[in-house]
Image (cartoon, grey):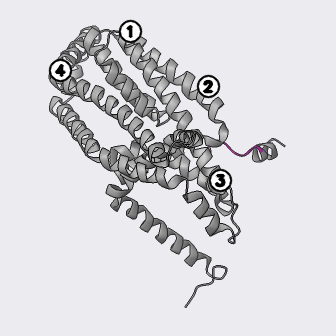
Amino acid sequence: MILDRTDNPGAQVLFSLACFVVIVFGLRAAAPILLPAALALFLAVLSLPVMVWLRARRVPKASAVVIPVLLNVAVVGLLITFASQSVSQLQRELPTYLNTLTQLQVSWLQAVEVRTDVVLTDYLTIDLIDPGAVISFARGAVGRIAQLLSMTFLVFLIMAFMLSEATVFPAKFKFLTRNSGFEDDRLEKVVSEVQTYLGLKTIISIATGLILGTWAYAMGLDFPVLLGLTAFLLNYIPTVGSIIAAIPAVLLSIILYGSLGHALLVTLGYVTVNTVFGNIIEPSLMGRRLGLSTLVVMLSLLFWGWAWGPLGALLSVPLTVIVKIWLENTTDLRWVAILLDKSAPQEALAESGD
């Protein structure tokens, strides 16, 4: 028996929800396959203009595919080398940092108790920071980096095959959709907008990482390279990422100098850079259409983090923006893209203003 959508709207809603649940748990179950594919897709989209440029200059197809892959290998290898050196040094220094932070915590509590005659230890435990938990977290982070390294070869292999198919797939798509009522240029529009978003976001993230890494070095903080790399990666997550990236720098400032003034100065640098890039430069370059509401950013962070772990959280906003771009170019699902947008359409704003 086939249910009629018009006669059974409730059944249709339940069916849609059931499909959504299946897709969600499918994404989580297939994470070992889909996560490397998503990483490879991002790198392939960013590298596609290089391959097209090489092909336009009559470089053989095989070389035009291999050269962008080798460039990505070199860049990622360089980043991993710098990060691994800093992380290994951080592991050695972490117990000393935690001991210093605990001593500062005790001295601050005692100073407040002397001035206010309030025994804070009756309300607050001295062990606000558990050194064992922090060290375990750091070791877990190193383990996740090792897991990422083991995935790297698979990511670049998938990326190479994606680039090799890039010149053939649009023709296949046009052939399949020529009699189905779809717009022939829809795929090209989606790819172009995704390239624009990922390209601009990557450039802005690189600039953010370089400036904040230089700021950390100028402020005399340890591990400025690692702090810059952290700012670069977390800049892909709007609002929340900049806050998380600032926490290690502020803690290092407190540990190394024991001065709230120095920590406030470090914080001011982070706030200034993220405000300029996040609220002025990025919106002016990307425009309103590539923005997401803050609620959607938080929900996507939770969802992709739950489905694919820390790397999923890192890729959460780019993945959601890609989905939003695809929805915008699909007529019957454009309303979902409007719900994900940062602001209402201009027509709706004009109507509400009237």
Residue under the image location 28 percent in, 15 percent down: 222
**What is the three-letter code of the residue carrying label 4?**
Glu
Q: Is residue 299 visible?
A: no
Q: Earlier in the sequence, mark 3 or mark 4?
A: 4
Circles 2 and 4: CB distance less than 8 Å? no
Label 3 element class: helix
Q: Earlier in the sequence, mark 2 or mark 1?
A: 1
**What is the three-letter code of the residue carrying label 2?**
Ile
- Number of other residues with Cα within 10 Å of mark 4, as a class: few under 14, some 14 to 19, many 20 or more: few
**Cα distance in 3D space between marks 1 and 4:** 21 Å
**Near-viewer residue (168 or 246):** 168
- What stretch of residues is rendered in magenta? 342-346
Give percent across and percent down for residue 337: 62, 52
Q: Main secondary structure of the magenta part?
A: loop
Give percent across and percent down for residue 194: 57, 45
Which residue is the site of mark 3? Answer: 328
Which residue is the site of mark 1? Answer: 218
Q: Is residue 202 above or below residue 334?
A: above
**What is the three-letter code of the residue carrying label 1?**
Ala
Circles 1 and 4: CB distance less than 8 Å? no
**For residue 282, side relative to residue 31 (left or right):** right
Q: Which mark is residue 280?
A: 2
Label 1 element class: helix
**Cα distance in 3D space between marks 3 and 1:** 44 Å
